[in-house]
Each structure stands twice: as C-alpha cells, then as structure tokens.
Image (cartoon, coloured by chain):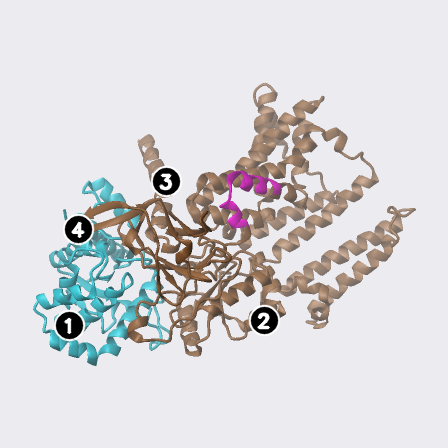
Chain colours: A brown, B cyan
Amino acid sequence: MPRIRLHRIVIFLLAFFIGVPVSAQSGNPPPADQVFSLTASRSTEGGLQLDWRIAPGDYLYRDKIAAKTAAGETVAITTPPGQIKDDPTFGTTEIYHDHVQADIAATDLPAGEVVIIYQGCAERGICYPPVRKRIDLAAMTVTNGAAADPLGDIEAAVPNQSPVGSPANVSASSDGISATTRLLSGHVAAMLAAFFGFGLLLSFTPCVFPMIPILSGILARSGEHLSAKRGFVLSAAYVLAMALAYAALGVAAAWSGQNLQIALQTPLALGAISFVFVALALSMFGLYDLQLPASWAERLSAGAAGNRGSIGGAALLGFGSALIVGPCVTPPLAAALLYVAQTGDLARGAAALFALGLGMGVPLLAFGTFGAGLLPKSGPWLVRIKHVFGFGFIAMAVWMLSRVTPEWLTFELWGACLIGLGLYLGAASIFSKKSWCNCHVGPETLGAIILACGALLLFGSISGNDLLRSLPIFNSLRTNDEVAGGEFQTVTSLATFDAAMATARVTGKPVLLDFSANWCVECKIVDRNVFGDKTVRERMRDVVLIRADMTDYNDDSRALMQRFNVVGPPTMIFLDAQAGQEIPETRTVGPVDADTFIGKIASARGS
Amino acid sequence: MTTMTTLTSQPAVLLRRVLISIALFVAVGSQPACADEADTTRDAILNDPAAPVAGNPKGDLTIVTFFDYNCPFCKKAEPNLERLVKADGKIRLVYKDWPILTEASVTGAQLVLAAKYQGKYDVAHQALMNIPGTKISAEQMREAIKASGIDMDRMDADLAAHSDEITALLRRNLAQADAIGLQGTPGYLIGQYKVTSALNYNGFKRAVADARALAAKR
C-alpha cells in the first residue's frame, strides 16, 4: 500500500512540475512581434532584403506581406511562393513556416524609410493583428511602426505621429531587455564565456571567502600528506558540485517560472544570510574557530576507503556552499534566472549558470591545488587580515539587511560598524609597538576619522538631522523614497492601479509604470542613476509616474505583474494613458543607465 | 470537417490541449475606483450594457467571446460555441466585436452592431461568421447581411444615427481585450478562465465544466 501511495505522489509531483509551466507558457500566447521577428539587410544588388524568423507552430500569410512608403504608397515587394493551405474555413491561402525572405528591388525603394506590414496566425488557433515595422534604409534598423489603430479611419482621428526610434534598436527582436539578458540570447559559446568571466570576477569579491575555510577544512581532513594532485581532485569535485548547484538553480527557475530572486530576497532569507555573515565575522575575530561540526566531518571522512568518501564529501559541501554565497551573486544570477524563467530554455539557462559556477571556482581550484604555497604563513599579519575580513563580513550583513530594514536603522547599523572599526584601529595602534603598515596616515588617525564618521551616522540618524543628507558620500545610502518617491504614485494592486490610470487618463500625459520593491537592490540603483539624473527629471516632467510596489509579494502584486507580463523588479514600462496599453519598445528590465532611459522616454513621447 | 485540425478527437490529447490552453483569468480590478473611467474592469467586460448578449441572460456562467469577422479560427470555433450554449441552457454569452485583423473587419463589426438596433444582431453576426475565408471584403460582408434578410435601409440609418455609440463600444472592446492581455483572435473568457485559442465542442464543454467547478470551489 505505501508503495502505491508513493507512486501516486511521485506522479502527482511530476505532473505538477511538468504541467504547470507548460500551461503558464502556452496559456497566453506571445505577442505577434515576438512570434514573427524581422531583420533587414542590403542585398547584393543594392535592394532591400527582408528576413522573417517564424516561431514553430506559427505561420505568415504571403498575401499579407506588404511594403509602403512613409506616406502610405504601395511599394513593390517580391515574395517566394508559399505552402498552399487549403481548408474549408480558411479558403485557399499561401503561407510560410519557419523562415521566409522577401526582397524589394533597389529601383523600387523609396528614399529614407520603408514601412513593412505582415500578418499571420498560430496553428493552435489564434490569428494575430497586422504588425507594422519601419525600416531606416540608411542604418538598416527595424523599429516599430505607428501602432495601427483599427478604428483610426472610422473615427477620422488625428493621424498618429511616427515614433522616434532610438538608435539602440537594431533589430525587430530587440525589446529593451537589459544587456545581460540579451547576452544570453547570443551565441552559446560567447554566452558561456561571458558567464565564466562573470564568475571569475565574482570570485574576487568577498562572496567566495566563506568557501575558503570550508575547502581548507576538506583538504586538512584529507590526510597527512596532501599532494597537489589530491588537492586538485578534491577541489575540482568541490567546484564542479558548486557549479552544478547553480545549474540546478537555473533548471528550477525554468521549471517553476517563479521569480527566484524574490524568494531569495524575503526578509526571512535576508535575515538568515545576514546572521551567517555575522557568525563568519565573529569567527574571523577569533571568538571561535569555524570548523564543520565534528559529526559532519566524521560522516564525510568515514565513507568507504578514504578517497571516494572525501571526494563525495567535497562535492556535497560544494553543492551546499553555492547556496551560502547565492545571495551575494544576485545581479548576474538574477539576470540569468530571469532569462531562464522567461524563455523556459532549460539547457541554455543551466549551462550559463554552470559556467558562472565554474568561473567562481577557478581561484578555489588554484587554492586547493597549490594550497600550501598560497596559504600565508601564520603570524600577526594573518590575524589582522582575518580581522579585516571580519569587518567585511559585518558590512555584508548590514548591506544585505539594508534591503529590508528602515533607513534610520540602516544608518544606525552602519554607524555602529564604523565606530567598531575606528575603535579597533585605535586599539591596534595603541597596543602594537610600531606601526604595522607603511601608510603615511597612521592607523590611529584613520581610526579617529572612521570613529567620527560612525558617530556622525549614529547620532545623526537618531536626531533625524538633515546634516547627513547634505553630505554627498551618503547619497549612495539613500533609499527609493528620498530620490524619487515623492513624485511617484504608489500602487499595490490592480484596483489601485486602475484608479491611478483613470486619473492619468484625464491628464492625457503618458504614464511610466515602475515595478519596484524595497528589497530590490537594482531598483535603488535605478532610482539613483536614472531618477536622480537631472536630464531624466527634466524630460519626465510631463509624465505621470506610477510605482507598482512589490515589497509585499502577494496575490495582488502578482496580479499586477501578470497583467504586464513582468517577471520581477526592476521593470519600467511606458503606458499610453488613453489606451491603457504598453507603448512598444519602451520596456526596460533590470538596471538601466540614464542614457538608455532617455532613449526610452523619446520612444514613449514619439508614439 | 467541423473539428479543429489542431484539436484531435482523442480524449487524452484533447484533455491535454484544454489544460494547456486555458489559464486562469485574473480578475481585472474587481472594484472600479472610478466607474465612468474604468472601462476595463471585470465588471465592465462582463456587463457592458451595449454589448450584445445571447444564451441565457440569467445563466450561472458567462462566456465572453472576442472575435473578428476575418478570423478563420473564430469561424471554426463559432458553431461549437453556439451549440454548447444552446445545449447547456445556463450559459450567458457576451459578444465582443474585436476587429483587429483587416480593415473590412471594422466595417463588418459596424454593420452587425447597427443591425442590433433592429433586434437582428445574431442574424447579421451569423451571416458574417458563416462566410468561410480570411479575406472577406466589406462588399462581400454587406452582401451576406443583405442575403440574411436584414432591413438594409434601416441598418444604414441606424449606423448613421448611432455611429458614435458603435465606435465607442468597439473602442471599449479594444481596450478590454488589451487589458486582459489578448494577443490575437479569438479570445474567450469562460468564467474565471481565459482561453486564448479556438476550441472544439468538447474543448468548450470541458472548459465550461472546469470553470463551474472552480466557481463552486470559491
């Protein structure tokens, strides 16, 4: 009986994991613009060559492909014979699957630009409205044409102005996804190399330090005589397992379709991670030695004949370690996970994260192989370095907590940190007979300065003094609300969003919908770099600002995200207040800089 | 052949297809904060006073159909839907003319909505849905409506007199389709479910049963 029940549970779980994302993906078909992607190039005869990539299961109509001048005159376009589709309900039509190429002869090309119109359906039973694209014949760029308003003619409305395409839009498929995510859609080899590089860079951040004592623990337990070969094998197992853990994370993201970034950023998770960092810091200060629990170590080394057990143990710890440093690598991880979750491309997402893990592991590998040589000789020098790491870990803990703690508390914590560091440096210089570094500024001076800064932060935030805000250095610590919050109308549900849109409609101004959250670090960067920018603020003067606050990630906020197909903050979308719909080519996902965003404002204005 | 090519009649495949093609229709703002402005709330979609309604007006389940008179899949699915509405007897069917595919589609929608003023929306609607093909011209549509026995003079007069109302309704329909994230025709709201492709008879039937089951659970 229990066995049967277990079977049922397994089948249920399988159905759950396999079934859910499939329905989530196919439930809402992708827009026509994604299904039919158009690129333009100059043909060898000087004409215009148009290439469509058609998603599997979709098709384009031959007789719905048309070219026009900007003024609306028909331009002759040559299309190849299509597949004949003969069906009682459809009539006889000629269609293209997969790929089609059309040409416009050089002699037929108008000056400046040409508008291409095309239309198609999906075999699963849905027909798309016509897509219009403008092609700049000098730059060969494809941008969205004026959105066709089906009722435009009968209303005799004022004709839509052509949108001002931003030069960044080089192909029809570019839809404003951040650079990292776009990277993922490039060549596989280039993508893997890039993620490997990312990993390598990340390995030089403090993120990887917690792994060093763990790895050295493994090596130390591996036996009296640790050869370079043995060290290499063990650390390779450790690093491979770590990379696999990231790959698994990628697969999980693709399967679940959920935003793992959000899961990793809940106050509970952040609190736990901060706690781990504080614990690490305390061990660095020598309060206790960080060792694996003895029982673990025994179990790991107690495996079958020495070697295999240790390799397995190394692998196990490698897998676990990836989760320890997980939050530290959030930005590239989130970009990869966002992409994986969006596309559901398991293999690519997993490979990217695997490469990331490998990159992060390279220095560990070096450490494991040449460990003895690389390890600094014990002495006061090493103790000081450990203390510095300790302060680094404390800072990491505060930084992580600052995503969820209120601003005043964050200042308190930073203040306390600095005071601690200042006292430490002061004490160090008092107790050491001679200066322990060759700096021109003595540690006691440095300590006094840091102490003063810490006190300023601590007491400044207690008294609510505006002095802090006048200091440029603290700008980087400012949060959302201060930079731009005042101008944003905050919504947290579809109902409040609809109400805000109703108000915006009266003003007739375009709307910027910004998905943001207090726990979202990139959002704060966007706030500072984009909304803090003078030009941006100037250009945004006649834009209605609505902020969808995802801080409480619940059904209401999920519904808002679903309405706009948003995977996670930071995402910014310009909306047409009248139609209440997204203005094409204006979406940004992930951190953007002010210049890119100014381009988006121009696109939004142009439509 | 009345069933869809993509929907085979094998029950297992069918079930899978239905499961795949229905996704929860997320309520679009349950409480309109500003009733005059909010045309795209759930209530506005289900109860637009100007939208034609068929089936049982007091039914326990509402199906909203977004369609275009040049949409082949809409035409294929239409008889299945109408048959189910009749057989079931407790479905309220709301028509949303959503002319997005061709210019003639807009004319067709205007004509059919004008016929509503003489109480003949369903006649005109059926006349256009019964013309097979994807490139029906406005003239062909006019001919088909004429052949169905509609008073053409009255229709033209109503179209002239109520032009603004009809355009406003179409405008609302466009906004509503956008609000619920439809990308192409046809699109259906079946209770709480959003269905974004054409279905055959059993597909509709299953979706209706699922929607009722979901409603009972809530």
Q: Label 3, on which residue? A: A13
Disc 1 is attached to a residue of which chain? B
Q: Can you say whether A56 is above or below B47 in the image?
A: above
Residue at the image point whose x is 73% and y is 46% from the top: A389
Q: What is the secondary structure assignment of the residue under circle 4? A: helix
Instruction: Pick out the residue farthest to the front.
Output: A107
Which of discs 2 and 4 lies nearer the camera? The answer is: 2
Quarter of the rendering containing residue A128: bottom left
Q: What is the secondary structure assignment of the residue under circle 2? A: helix
Residue A58 placement, left or right of A265: left
Q: Label 4, on which residue? A: B201
Coordinates of residue A331 in the picture (x, y in percent): 57, 50
Marks 2 and 3, how far apart in space?
50 Å
Disc 3 is attached to a residue of which chain? A
Is residue B91 located in the magenta-colored stretch of the structure? Answer: no
Coordinates of residue B214 in the picture (x, y in percent): 27, 55
Amino acid, disc 4: Tyr
Q: Are marks 3 and 1 in contact (CB under 8 Å)?
A: no
Amino acid, disc 2: Arg
Residue A589 placement, left or right of B202: right
Amino acid, disc 1: Ala
Q: Can you say whether A85 is above or below A556 in the image?
A: above
Which range of residues does the magenta coloring cover? A180-197
